[in-house]
Image: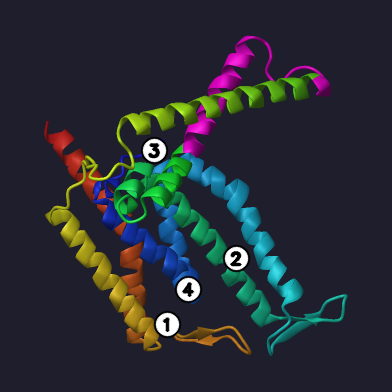
Amino acid sequence: MTNRDTFSGFHPLVNFLYFGFVLAFAMVFTHPVCLALSFLCAFSYAVYLNGKKAVRFSLLYMTPMFVFAALLNPAFNHQGATILTYLPSGNPLTLESIAYGLAAAAMLVTVITWFSCFNAVITSDKFVYLFGRIIPALSLILGMALRFVPRFKAQIRVIGDAQKCLGRDMSNGNILQKARRGIRVISIMVTWSLENAIETADSMKSRGYGLPGRTAFSIYRFDHRDCRALIFILVCAAYIIIGSVTGGLYFRYFPTVKGLWNTPYALSIFAVYAALGAMPLILNIKEDLIWKSIALKT
């Protein structure tokens, strides 16, 4: 079951800057505490947005990917001073390579999870609104690509159900019959995609897309709520960046594992990092509590 997302109702600029910062921080900061906080925030937000689908996606895809990425690094990276044992090839297996492999795997899973939240919040119309005036052609292509994937999945499900009603689904018959029916579904999808592209092009042409002086309607307005959220994001991001530049997030994996953990400055950066990552979830929980209190009063 999915929930109503309050954060999606903010201005597209707020949404885009938020995901820009959290994705950049997830890819840059390799401190274990930052990786753990970022993953917990991303996973919690993904579960709030997509419900059981996010849990199923994590179990079926993210967990094997994490294990594979964590095992891949020590198999090829043999740096580090703490040798645990020797591999059959004669290369050493070090504690530092294992730790770095776990960090790299956590970073990969975290970034993918944040991108799943990004795709749920930043819709194609928001993307076109943000970049339509700056890069109109590229923003239109990216917006159509982001919109095409869910439409393609929904349409192929409709076609599959229609073929099943006719007794032509791919779950019955021998291999040759299944292949023939699968090719039929793909042929229908290609025809639908081409027809949809022609209709989209005609619609854009009739609405004057690309003509000089053409204006665009927008439902987005930047209000006081968006201003407060933007200030909060910028202040948190600035504090984290300053903390990283001044060494507050210092951590290394080679030649030995060493870093800052429990200094007051580092703890303050971790707190701000957690507040930034949990911002959408906190807004949603607060909004849900308000709605529940209103429902109880009525």
Sequence-wise, the earlier of marks 4 and 1 is 4
* 237 lies left or right of 153: left
Quarter of the rendering occupied by the C terminus = top left
- Inspect this view and state whether residue 223 appears: yes
| Residue pointed to by mark 1 | 249
Task: State the mark number for residue 2.
Answer: 3
Q: Is residue 30 left or right of residue 169?
A: left
The majority secondary structure of the magenta stretch comes to: helix
Q: Earlier in the sequence, mark 3 or mark 2?
A: 3
User: Which residue was labeled with disc 4?
Assistant: 28
Picture coordinates of residue 205, whole percent (x, y): 36, 32
Q: Amino acid at mark 1?
A: Leu
Separation (CA) of disc 1 from disc 2: 19 Å
Q: Is residue 278 visible?
A: no
Nearest the viewer among 171 and 81 is 171
Q: Which residues are magenta?
A: 148-176
Q: Does the residue at mark 3 contact the one at mark 2 (Cβ under 8 Å)? A: no
Measure how far apart labels 4 and 1 are at the Cα level.
11 Å
Identify the residue at horizontal 66%, vertical 75% (top origin): 98
